[in-house]
Amino acid sequence: MEAYCVKCKSKKEMKDAAETTMKNGRKAMKGKCPTCGTGMFRIMGKA
């Protein structure tokens, strides 16, 4: 899953990506940046 890293200011492939569900019921992916190790987060669709 590709996400934007705020620290590196570029889109990268997430490391250790795991699917989570937010409070409002939407799905999201949480992972880490392979370069700097910063937490990355990507919101997905409703389903």
Image: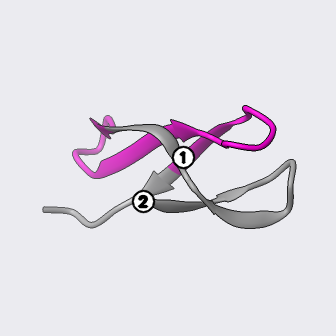
Name above or below for residue 1 compared with residue 18.
below
Using the image as rendered, state which of residue 14 and residue 39 is in the foreground.
Answer: 14
Q: Residues within 10 Å of mark 2 (few under 14, many from 20)?
A: few
The boundaries of the magenta stretch are 19-41
Residue at point 86%, 48% (across, down): 7
Residue at point 57%, 60% (across, down): 3
- Quadrant for the C terminus in the image: bottom left
Q: Which residue is mark 1?
A: 41
Name above or below for residue 18 compared with residue 46.
above
| Coloring applied to the structure | one colour
Q: Amino acid at mark 2?
A: Met
Which residue extends farthest left? 47
Q: Locate residue 27 relative to residue 5 in the image: left or right.
A: left
Q: Which residue is mark 2?
A: 1
Residue 13, percent from left and from top:
55, 58
Residue 34, percent from left and from top:
67, 42
